């Protein structure tokens, strides 16, 4: 572990693992990974953009630790979370003779992490993998907790598996290479942890937003560690999302529908969809009399100050009408007996799960937020 790195434990019994957060972790990856290997052989999965930025550093670290390695570079972007790329990756891993004693490394953002984890879960009925997330979103959310998967024509993450990593290395140096839009998309997931169960953390984020955006290392480490601690505790309590873990989906029922509506394209990246979804969840909660109106305003103002979209009107291009968006929500994997699952709030830091939302009030909200 690098001197300034922090450690968070995901307590899952014999499948427990550590998350390390701090600078220089890609350069130190070989030393972290070596104790996990029965055979000193790994396969690296990355995308073309991340490969240019970070793959040489990782390969040098593996060489120093005496670990043999090979790498595949997949196209960057959400469209890589597909059956076609899953087949390509799985066949490549088999061609590389990756066995259960080896390790697959996901080097990249949430797309690479989700796809790699899913491939590892089905390869030889399950091989180990490690996450080296290079975006803020993947460091605080998708790399932790073992949810893996791909998108289908019916919606986001509808094919997948629970498969926990052996290790997560969240290198904060990698965040310096992110475009601000990608950093802010990840910041939406950081805000989520304050909104679902930690009002004090949301207060802290309001006070420290500028330092986070400006790249203050210690502030970023603190935000990532706090987020990972919240997710680790939730995953340990409810690994397979049968109860409290569903709270982590605040904003996602709306957000996933909006991603589908925009064709999983650069018009709206995942964290931006979550930001709009969280603002809508607070607004809907306020209109249902569940949440103080000032909390909904405060959340929307913070997201806007961060530079995130917080209404349908902020999304470029045309969108389906209210009924069309509700139909897309119906493809969400959290639908039970045909009923949509919503994460609503009683206020900042007090979220809950419900399937009892008046469809007319939902429709009215979406119609009012439709762009002119």
Image (tube, helix red, strand yellow):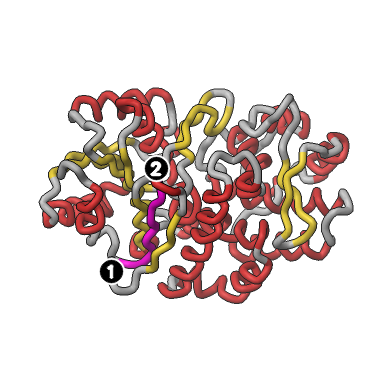
Question: Are the two marked residues, 1 and 2, in contact with CB atoms closer than 8 angstroms?
Answer: no
Q: Quadrant of residue 102?
A: top left
Quadrant where the N terminus is found in the figure:
bottom left
Residue 343 rendering spot, x and y as whole percentages:
71, 46
Where residue 175 appears, as percent x and y from the top left, is 39, 61
Q: Relative to residue 54, is residue 64 drawn left or right? A: left
Does 129 sit left or right of 111 as displayed? Answer: left
Q: Who's the residue at 74% across and 65% down the image?
A: 298
In the image, is residue 20 part of the stretch drawn in magenta?
Answer: yes
Q: Is 166 covered by the magenta stretch?
A: no
Label 2, residues with CA under 10 Å away: few <14, some 14-19, many ≥20: many
Secondary element at tag 2: helix
Describe residue 28's horizontal placement relative to residue 107 as left or right. Answer: left
Choose top left, top right, bottom left or bottom right for residue 199.
bottom right
What's the residue at 59%, 64% (across, down)?
306
Q: Answer left or right for 152 relative to 131.
A: right
Q: Quadrant of residue 246?
A: top right
Q: Residue at 42% x, 42% y: name it.
A: 164
Q: Which mark is residue 2?
A: 1
Residue numbers of the magenta segment? 15-23
Query: What residue sits right under mark 2 in the picture?
Result: 113
Q: Which of 333 and 372 is in front in this view?
A: 333
Q: Earlier in the sequence, mark 1 or mark 2?
A: 1
Task: Check residue 72 in the rendering and tell me which mark sits there, or answer none.
Answer: none
Q: How far from the left and from the top, in percent, is residue 267? A: 55, 42
């Amino acid at each position: 572990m690098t001197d300034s790195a922090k450690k968070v434990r995901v307590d899952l019994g014999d499948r427990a693992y550590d998350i390390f957060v701090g600078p220089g972790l890609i350069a130190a990856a070989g030393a972290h990974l070596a104790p996990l290997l029965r055979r000193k052989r790994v396969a690296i999965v990355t995308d073309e953009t991340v490969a240019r930025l970070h793959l040489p550093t990782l390969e040098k670290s593996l060489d120093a630790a005496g670990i043999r390695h090979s790498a595949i570079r997949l196209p960057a972007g959400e469209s890589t979370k597909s059956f076609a790329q899953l087949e390509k990756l799985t066949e490549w891993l088999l061609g590389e003779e990756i066995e259960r004693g080896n390790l697959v490394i996901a080097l990249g953002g949430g797309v690479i992490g989700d796809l790699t984890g899913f491939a590892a879960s089905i390869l030889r009925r399950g091989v180990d993998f490690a996450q080296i997330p290079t975006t803020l979103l993947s460091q605080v959310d998708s790399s932790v907790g073992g949810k893996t998967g791909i998108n289908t024509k019916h919606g986001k993450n509808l094919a997948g598996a629970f498969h926990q990593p052996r290790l997560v290395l969240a290198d904060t140096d990698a965040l310096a290479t992110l475009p601000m839009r990608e950093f802010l998309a990840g910041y939406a997931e950081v805000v989520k942890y304050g909104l679902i169960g930690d009002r004090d953390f949301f207060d802290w984020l309001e006070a420290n937003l500028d330092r986070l955006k400006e790249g203050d290392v210690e502030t970023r480490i603190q935000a990532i560690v706090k987020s990972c601690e919240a997710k680790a505790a939730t995953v340990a309590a409810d690994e397979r999302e049968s109860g409290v873990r569903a709270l982590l989906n605040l904003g996602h029922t709306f957000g996933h529908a909006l991603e589908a509506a925009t064709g999983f394209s650069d018009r709206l990246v995942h964290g931006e969809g979550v930001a709009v979804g969280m603002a809508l969840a607070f607004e809907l909660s306020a209109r249902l009399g569940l949440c103080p109106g000032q909390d909904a305003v405060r959340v929307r103002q913070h997201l806007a100050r961060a530079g995130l979209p917080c209404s349908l009107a902020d999304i470029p291009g045309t969108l389906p009408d209210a009924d069309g968006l509700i139909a897309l929500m119906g493809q969400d994997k959290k639908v039970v007996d045909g009923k949509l699952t919503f994460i609503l709030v009683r206020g900042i830091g007090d979220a809950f799960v419900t399937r009892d939302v008046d469809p007319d009030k939902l429709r009215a909200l979406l119609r009012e937020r439709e762009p002119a």
